[in-house]
Image: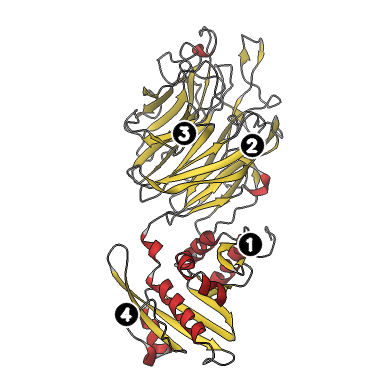
């Protein structure tokens, strides 16, 4: 058992899995999931939207226990919270239950044929138990629908509690008919801690909802990467598998030098990272320092998917690795590892740095020596990361921060239409600062579009990619102060989740924050945030098959 049993989300998911395996139609969340006197306040250990979403994915209905006095007192504010719950159980004299069969009015007839009636009013106080109610409603998109609500009682004196009966009926009808808030479509955003206390999560989601993830663990100066995976059928992660073949060969210090993950069209996982000071093999000799530098390391899952191959250094001719490298893989089996560094005869300082790409056209089995990605002399911000992304339509994208004249720290977008042989590029966001902001970037795609995100001047921004440009920049809501490490996820409806960090710094953690946007770039709902982001860490975002989002932090 990989969780602590109790009234918590993990235990409820375990019960849902059991119910699904046993082909049970419902499961009950008993008392303790919320404050007894305030059912709008679930226990901190209970994530009710996530439980409902997970149960729905398993075709299991959810009932919750509630005390009737709380329902009576909080009727209007509580109903919107329960619109996805299939049943409620109340405590009074005897037990009253409301069993809801959404969009299944035929369930009424075999149960209580004499009690079925169409168009039952939401606020009626004249319910009779036992009985059934056929509820007519109109969906938000305008389509009619009917549901069946079966009301039952067991125990003492039905006649002694007319209010109890009424509350049961009213609440059941509200659930079946849809609470007022149900017309506001807000994709669920679920917060999940990185397993085993890991930091710096990087996630890659498959269209079916499976998630591949790597995370860092150990001494930030020299620790390890671990790989875990969830499937389309279960959100439980697999047992951790160490990625690096040499213990302590990964660096997390500075936040932007850790592992990067990509998944090719055959489901093979590829990982790249900046080697620590003790990592082997070493990188090329840095002529400016006179000693071998840090390596740009790469590995992939073996053919059986049971372990990662021995780590390799793909940095053969360039030198001066500093900011974080990156990896991308496409559906055709092409794998790309990129970083920024210097070549022999380069100009001094960061202005002499450039982006290098090593290509593999046999799914990572072999790599050609690295070559410069672009012929423009923009420099590269030494301690900033960069990112590659292979879009499904075949374009290879790169984002990096320049260091032209050491003060123009602009974001550049590169695009290759010929499998990395050549790139076209453009400046997408300028920033003039004579310092290294230690920033990172990200890509995501869905619904036929690719999106890019980055940081400028303490604010995080994103936009839809068009060629090698981002015509419309969309900023996170609120004040631009100390925001870093943006991550993106896009669902099949074209809705985008933007995740970022706030308040982080050198050897200092902070908070995770997020905002959902519709396909036009307009905000959906309010900005969210949560404290407790560990030192040297950031968030990762993934889209599930049902369109919901998960943030790992």
Q: Which residue, given by chain and number where applicable, does mark 1 sit on? A: 8
In this picture, residue 487 sits left or right of residue 538: left
Q: Quadrant of residue 271?
A: top right
**Residue plotted at (41% across, 22% down):** 430
**Residue plotted at (59% across, 35% down):** 503
What percent of the width, then of the height, locates residue 512? Answer: 56, 42
**Along the polypeptide, which appears first: circle 1 or circle 4?**
1
- Spatial separation of the CA atoms under disc 1 and disc 4: 38 Å
Other-residue count near label 4 (Cα within 10 Å), few / some / many at <14 / 14–19 / ≥20: few
Above or below residue 454? Residue 149 is below
Q: Which residue, given by chain and number where applicable, does mark 4 sit on? A: 119
What percent of the width, then of the height, locates residue 224? Answer: 68, 37
**Residue plotted at (70% across, 31% down):** 222
Q: In the image, which disc is placed on residue 460?
A: 3
Q: In the image, which disc is placed on residue 210?
A: none
Callouts 1 and 3 close, C-beta under 8 Å = no
- Spatial separation of the CA atoms under disc 1 and disc 3: 33 Å
Other-residue count near label 2 (Cα within 10 Å), few / some / many at <14 / 14–19 / ≥20: some
- Spatial separation of the CA atoms under disc 1 and disc 2: 26 Å
């Amino acid at each position: 058992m990989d969780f602590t049993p109790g009234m918590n989300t993990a235990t409820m998911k375990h019960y849902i899995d059991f119910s699904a395996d046993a082909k049970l139609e419902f499961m009950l969340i008993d008392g303790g999931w919320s404050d007894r006197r305030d059912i709008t306040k679930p226990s901190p250990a209970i994530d009710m939207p996530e439980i409902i979403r997970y149960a729905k994915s398993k075709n299991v209905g959810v009932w919750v226990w509630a005390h009737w006095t709380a329902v009576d007192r909080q009727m209007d504010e509580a109903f919107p919270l329960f619109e996805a719950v299939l049943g409620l159980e109340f405590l009074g004299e005897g037990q009253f239950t409301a069993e809801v069969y959404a969009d299944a009015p035929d369930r009424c007839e075999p149960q209580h044929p004499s009690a079925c009636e169409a168009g039952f009013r939401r606020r009626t106080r004249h319910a009779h138990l036992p009985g059934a109610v056929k509820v007519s409603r109109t969906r938000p998109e305008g389509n009619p629908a009917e549901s069946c609500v079966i009301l039952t009682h067991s125990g003492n004196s039905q006649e002694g509690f007319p209010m109890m009966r009424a509350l049961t009926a009213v609440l059941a009808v509200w659930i079946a008919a849809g609470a007022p808030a149900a017309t506001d479509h807000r994709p669920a955003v679920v917060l999940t801690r990185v397993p085993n206390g890991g930091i710096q999560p990087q996630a890659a989601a498959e269209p079916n909802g499976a998630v591949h993830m790597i995370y860092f663990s150990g001494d930030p100066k020299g620790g390890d990467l671990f790989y875990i995976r969830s499937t389309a059928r279960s959100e439980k992660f697999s047992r951790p598998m160490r990625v690096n073949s040499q213990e302590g060969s990964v660096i997390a210090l500075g936040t932007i030098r850790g592992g990067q993950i990509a998944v090719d069209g055959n489901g093979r996982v590829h990982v790249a990272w900046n080697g620590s000071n003790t990592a082997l093999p070493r990188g090329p000799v840095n002529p400016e320092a006179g000693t071998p530098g840090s390596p740009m390391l790469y590995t992939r899952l073996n053919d059986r998917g049971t372990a990662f191959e021995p780590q390799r250094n793909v940095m053969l001719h360039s030198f001066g690795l500093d900011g974080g490298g990156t990896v991308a893989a496409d559906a055709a089996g092409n794998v790309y590892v990129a970083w920024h560094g210097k070549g022999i005869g380069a100009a001094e300082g960061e202005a002499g740095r450039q982006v290098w790409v090593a290509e593999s056209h046999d799914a990572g089995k072999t790599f050609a020596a690295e070559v410069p990605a672009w012929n423009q002399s923009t420099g590269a911000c030494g301690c900033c990361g960069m990112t590659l992304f292979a879009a499904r339509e075949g374009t290879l994208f790169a984002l990096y921060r320049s260091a032209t004249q050491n003060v123009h720290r602009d974001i550049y977008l590169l695009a290759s239409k010929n499998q990395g042989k050549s790139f076209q590029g453009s400046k997408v966001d300028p920033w003039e600062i004579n310092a290294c902001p230690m920033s990172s970037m990200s890509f995501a795609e869905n619904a036929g579009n690719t999106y890019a995100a980055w940081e400028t001047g303490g604010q995080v921004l994103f936009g839809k990619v068009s060629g090698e440009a981002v015509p419309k920049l969309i900023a996170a809501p609120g004040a631009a102060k100390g925001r870093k490490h943006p991550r993106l996820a896009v669902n099949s409806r074209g809705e985008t989740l933007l995740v970022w960090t706030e308040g982080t710094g050198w050897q200092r953690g902070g908070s995770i924050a997020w905002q959902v946007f519709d396909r036009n770039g307009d905000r959906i709902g309010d900005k969210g945030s949560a404290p407790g982001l560990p030192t040297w860490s950031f968030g990762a975002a993934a889209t599930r098959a049902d369109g919901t989002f998960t943030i790992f932090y």
